Amino acid sequence: MQIQQAHPSETATVAAVLNEAAQWIAAEGRPLWSPADIAPERIQKDTDTGNYFIARTNGEVAGVVRLDLEDPYFWPEIESGTSLYVHKLAVRRAWSGHGVPALLLDFARERARSLGRSFVRLDCVADRAPLRALYERHGFLLHSVVHKGERGFARFELAVAPLAT
């Protein structure tokens, strides 16, 4: 599987994966992203700045992830330049069970390492036990739970070993 930065012209591709995931999660009775979170103009902004990455096998899109250099909303106390933040990790249903989330998280760790960042950090709704278990299986440690409005969010972090010199 190859993971490459999404080009601005691939906004529709990223949006399709995010919308498919959002519909599946909502159909399960666990809505996650608001329409504004995955609106085309928001996705375009993030593809324009190079924050989205697409996982493909033989040209077929398997999943996407957004990687941010800062996250003052969920991690306001973290020193700038120390972490890479994972957001909007989504896998197409056809690729469920093929380890795509693990590959995207591995990619995030290696990207953080290449950027000299000491941590990969992410958050999820605190009551999402399967998602929390996925992150923990991948080596992320629970940092804390914060409340934003009426929802609790579990914040996870993964220490990144520096590049060997």
Image (spheres, grey):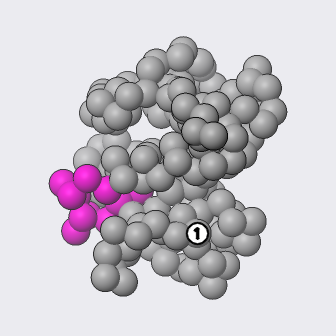
Q: Quadrant of residue 78?
A: top right
Q: Work out which quarter of the rendered image holds the C terminus and state it.
A: top right
Q: Amino acid at mark 1?
A: Gln
User: What residue is pinned by disc 1?
Assistant: 5
| Residue 108 is a magenta residue | no
Q: Is residue 121 visible?
A: no
Residue depicted at x 43% and y 46%: 105
55 versus 138 height, above or below? below
Residue 86 location, quadrant: top right
For the magenta stretch, what is the residue range?
90-100
Q: Secondary structure at mark 1?
A: strand
Total labels: the figure holds 1
Q: Quadrant location of the N terminus?
A: bottom left
Location of residue 160 with respect to 33 vertically, above or below? above
* Residue 120 visible in the displayed image: yes
Apparent side of residue 106 relative to residue 99 in the rendered image (left or right) = right
Query: In front here: 22 or 94?
Result: 94
Residue visible at 72% across and 32% down? 82
Q: What residue is drawn where x is 46% and y is 18%?
A: 142
